[in-house]
Amino acid sequence: MEEVTKIDPSLLSSFAELVGVHTDIERGMFLLYLIIVVLSIIVFNLGFAQKLSILKTIIIYVLLLIGCGPLALLGVRLPVAEGLLISAIILGLYRFRLYQQRQEQNKKG
């Protein structure tokens, strides 16, 4: 197979460079897509307070899988995965503090 384009690694986002988009475009884009999907699912689960029915959850996950395609394309040069990672960390810390606060209130009351 003939290589069509050569991507300069200095123009890539950190995750795109980490998964090797500049060396193997197909494998790198697939891995970047998977990272963005996993981080999006984590952010959705940490940020969404309500429990949904199974049908609504399936619809949301299907739409999330579709929507992460353009995000993966943008994530080659823009810090999409990095932003999702920071969002997941912040939401995780928030949920942990909320859990601690509820435990303290249950002990007092």
Image: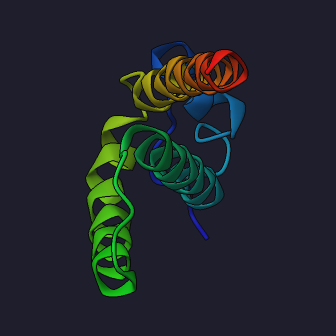
**Residue sitting at 51 percent across and 37 percent down?**
6
Query: In this view of the protein, can residue 68 be seen by the observer?
Result: yes
Q: Is residue 44 left or right of residue 98?
A: left
Q: Quadrant of residue 20?
A: top right
Which residue extends farthest bottom?
Answer: 55
Q: Quadrant of residue 106?
A: top right
Of 4 and 65, which appears nearest the observer? 65
Residue 75, placed above or below residue 2 = above
**Residue sitting at 69 percent across and 40 percent down?**
19
Q: How many numbered marks appear?
A: 0
Residue 55, placed above or below residue 57 = below
Residue 24, placed above or below residue 105 = below
**Residue sitting at 59 percent across and 47 percent down?**
35
- Place of residue 103 in the rendered image (x, y in percent of width and height, measured from the top left): 69, 25
- Place of residue 46 in the rendered image (x, y in percent of width and height, measured from the top left): 49, 40
Of 84 and 14, which appears nearest the observer? 84
